[in-house]
Image: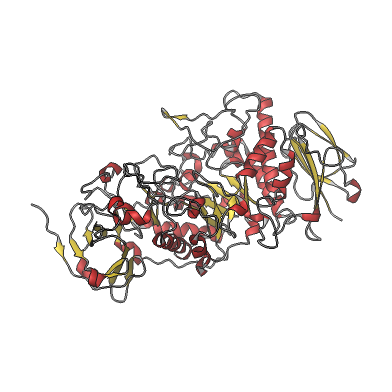
Amino acid sequence: MRKKTIRISAEKGVPYPMGVSWDSDTQTYNFALFSKSAKSVSLLFFRDPDLAHAVCRVDLDYLVNKSGHTWHCRIAKRDLNGAQLYGYSIDGPIHGRYQRINAFDSEKVLLDVYAPAVQFPKDFQPVDSVGKGSNRGKGPLGILTACENHYYWTPYKRRDVQELVIYETHLKGFTANPNSGVSEEKRGTYRGLIEKIPYLQELGVTAVEFLPVFQREPNTNDYWGYNTLNFFSPHNEYAATRDQLHQHEEFQEMVDALHRANIDVILDVVYNHSCEGNQEGPTYSYKGIDNASYYILSDDPNDPYMNFSGTGNTMDAREPAVQKMVVDSLCFWVEEMGVDGFRFDLASIFSRNSDGTVNTSSPPIFEKINAIKALDGVFLIAEPWDLGTYQLGQAFPGIRWMQWNSKYRECLQRFVKGDEGAVGELMSRLYGSNGEFPDDISVTYHPYQSINYIVSHDGFTMYDLVSYNEKNNWRNGHKNTDGSRDFSWHCGHDGIDDIPDEVMLLRKRQVKNFCTLLMLSNGTPMLKAGDEFLQTQQGNNNPYNQDNESSWLDWSKLETNKDIFRFFKMMIAFRKSHPGISRHTFWREDVRWYGVDGSADISKESHCLAYYLAGRRQDDDDLYVMINAYWKPLPFKIQEFERHSWRRVIDTAKSSPQDILQPGHEILVKKNTYRLQPRSVVVLVGRA
């Protein structure tokens, strides 16, 4: 016998805030949903475990329950017949509005765009929400009671931007491996990461940047998490307690614990598209609520979704409702979840107009973000490109934003590899990339706006960069053909098996060269998790779908390569103790550039550079840096030899612990010439 759905009435409610909100005084929920083109909206309520039959239903009256384009109502909790879950049934469009591009289907049960948490049926499969027809009992639902939670925060003041040393990691992959040392029940979870905070403190990083942690579909090959389902819910599979509500509490506990360790939290966020894909993908939420508003659409009925994200659809950042959704989401993660900053995937999509063209002057979403007080001082980091445009530096419309500097990455990879013609650009990258971020009086940029990195999640690990000439993306019978472009060199032996001793020594030296130059550069450094102990992905530069030990950090390598960990740790400490490196301004007159013997040689054939950098304060050392990317030893003349009694602190050609020396144990340089070994970096310190 079919179970009966009780129709209940609701008060008119208010059109704000969006989503579901809880009033503890009146014990009522307020619901608010944007849909510009809907002609009817109903709320459906469900009790777990029966997700196929609504226990009650509210049909909204537009004369009472609609203001502008927002549908709203207020319902007493006692009237919901014990329901914990909810979804929407929406029909449309309003006569004459967007007939050709609507995707309304009154049989679909739709997830609230602002759902505070998401529950999936036990046997969830995306295919069950594809095409026309009902997905009852098969699609995701919002969890009502998640909006009732409140967390009491430990006070925390995020650090100055110039102090950032960012550590990019996958939240699950950081602790999922059985050799992580984390309690078995907490591996790959928010609480598992808490157990590894002492490791992060020892390494010395000051901010952790997590790959996407927003709620996404289960049972898909989206290990990285870039196909977001909902922008207001933490991913439930990262909760150690397999309860529908604990992901909020555990995420907040993790952020609080990181803050108590004086580590900032940055989230990689994906507001440029959703997991609904194109016309062949599922309808969970945005399509069925208001397809024409949420997505950039074309005039082609056979291919209606413009695809500047490379994943099937593109959010329309010119649409006010999308702008509000993004801003509300950012505020939620800052105010409710304690986050300190965001890295925006494919941020150039924010500059797309509704017809797909690029607005190079003043895309409104940037002004919306700038106008929100809650976002003042929050770190905003852009990946300044999408599938069709590249906007690094002053070309990017977000003037205050930091940006992933892919030109820095490519230059450092090419130079350390030994490619020709890279010395001139290397000078610019060490200096802070002022060509892209000019300190002009009209619009003044700063070197910290350049996020400097050698590798990231999207490409080789640093060790694979020096172990493979070509990517090796065959995994589990599937070949991934995309991924970041890397300028790799295997140091004379391809792969990570049967490595000759001399090749391994060279690889370690090259990794130390990368680390040294990164930490000596003006700008904001970012490390990829595991590079500090030679993590490998076996040559796979695009493991977006590898939720297994090939992508999880292999903590056994921390013991195997503790000399490399020591070098990274001490190099980070060296940067922190020398404020002359990382500045609010460019180095300007405090830097003088040299070569092997005399002035800097920026010819095509050159592989060498040296420079003197004055310290910022009386208690700060001056630096003399010599860089030899040539494959033969070279005698460098120390041009500023008479200025100080110089002491060697770093020589990447030496074995640990002589490669980087503890403060107070530096070695006096007695001659004005220093013989640099092939492919090595030497750093001297001196004080007036």
Task: Determine if residue 486 is in view.
Answer: yes
Residue at 66 percent across and 32 percent down: it is 507
**Image quarter of residue 111:** bottom left
**Image quarter of residue 652:** top right
How many marks the image carries: the answer is: 0
In the current view of this chain or complex, which residue is farthest to the right? Answer: 642
Q: Is residue 570 shown above or below 606?
A: below
| Residue 247 placement, left or right of 500 | left
**Image quarter of residue 409:** top right
Front residue of 361 and 379: 361
Front residue of 233 and 322: 322
- Residue 249 spot, x, y in % from top left: 41, 60
Quarter holding the C terminus?
A: bottom right
Protein image colouring: secondary structure
Task: Determine if residue 284 is in view.
Answer: no
Residue at 54 percent across and 37 percent down: it is 556
- Residue 636 spot, x, y in % from top left: 84, 37
| Residue 619 placement, left or right of 197 | right
- Residue 585 spot, x, y in % from top left: 71, 58
| Residue 46 placement, left or right of 560 | left
| Residue 83 placement, left or right of 324 | left
- Residue 224 spot, x, y in % from top left: 45, 44
Front residue of 199 and 585: 585
In the current view of this chain or complex, which residue is farthest to the left? Answer: 1
